[in-house]
Amino acid sequence: MARSRGQVSWGAVFQEAALEPERWLRALRVLAETTGSARAQLIGIGSADAVAFNWVNEFSEKALADYARSELNTPQQNYRINANLHAVPGTILYETDYRAASLRLASDAYLDFCQDNDIPWGCQTNLIQEGEALVGLALLRRESDRPTNAAQRAEFGRAAEAARMAVRLQRAVEEQGHALLTGALEAMSAPCMLLDGNGRVSATTPSAEAVLGAAPELRLVEGQLLSDDPVLGRTLALALRAVLLDRRAERLMLHHGRRLDLFPLARREWALGFAPAAVAVFRDPDADLRAAAARVTDQFELSPAEASVVALIAQGRSRREIAVARSVSDETLKSQFRAIYAKTGCTRESEIMALLARLR
């Protein structure tokens, strides 16, 4: 049964959730009960339609997983998302909007999902929207709850204003930690980028900015890492989903032998997605090998001639190619190899390559 109007101090309910994020489900439960709804939802959608978080009271883990790992969270399949495309930001959408949006869907997949989980009715609004990323609040109502009425939507609107302030508060708290990490990142020489839970690039090192400027296949547009190459663009979108949702490291091959490595950071429970969620690192395999060769040179005190040989070994050159590149005889090269083996403890070229691999 719905609570009577005026009983709930929404500011207190949602501020408590912002300061103690594990209480978000409790706040959503209060919202659901007050409006006579089965469930309330707070959801974050990021780039590439990735779900940064999806909190729903009284909803099964299976249903949440089915939603997150499917194509249901796209405007082509989901009437709630589709309706949002045609709305003025900040308005409350409800069943009338859903019926119109349902006619624009590519299939009945989301309709079936709603039927299976008994959530056909409800209303929603965006609390924060920045480009493709948004945080939304919604009521998910059962068939027996019936569609929302004007009074319930008005109560939902009052709650949404308080929830919006709470999301901004929690975002500020998360970004304080983000700022500390960004400061540490700026002091690094490696070409790295920080990504938040929505897949947006929130900080870069100077060397990463230089790589982006020299990499025509990648563009940074309003925090989104994009590619004009359709194949690379799709691969990048899938890699971001894997890192943000599955917490799995990914590797993308770029042009000119470069690659982009993506690593998930430790996930904070009940985070809204504004804290750092992943690190992206540009790699230049040739530069890595040169650096490894330099470390071998320093560690084992190689002469300049021996260091040059190791650098060419790192490039995968044959003995004949090394001799030609260095303009030395085969006998001179053999002598240099013997000196390198004596200093490093290696006995063959494959061991030199293994040593380089360890030091990369």
Image (tube, rainbow, N blue to C red):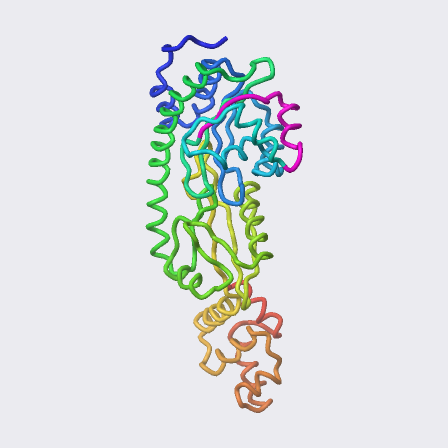
Q: Nearer the viewer, residue 14 or 119?
A: 119
Q: Is residue 200 above or below residue 174?
A: below
Q: Is residue 306 above or below residue 191?
A: below
On the image, the x and y values in percent for residue 74 come to: 57, 38
Q: Is residue 352 above or below residue 84?
A: below
Q: Nearer the viewer, residue 204 or 307?
A: 204
For the point 44% across and 9% down, which residue is it?
3
| Quarter where residue 247 is shown | top right
| Quarter where residue 167 is shown | top left
Q: Nearer the viewer, residue 59 or 40?
A: 40
Q: Left or right: where does residue 112 sit relative to residue 293?
A: right
Q: What is the total number of numbered labels drawn onto the structure image?
A: 0
Q: Left or right: where does residue 216 sit relative to residue 70?
A: left
On the image, the x and y values in percent for residue 332 come to: 55, 89
Q: Is residue 299 above or below residue 40?
A: below
Residue 110 located within the stretch drawn in magenta: yes
For the point 53% across and 90% down, which residue is it?
327
On the image, the x and y values in percent for residue 317 come to: 59, 78
Residue 70 located within the stretch drawn in magenta: no
For the point 51% across and 17% down, which residue is it?
148
For the point 36% across and 23% down, which residue is it?
16
Q: Left or right: where does residue 293 sit relative to residue 171?
A: right
Q: Which residues are magenta?
A: 106-125
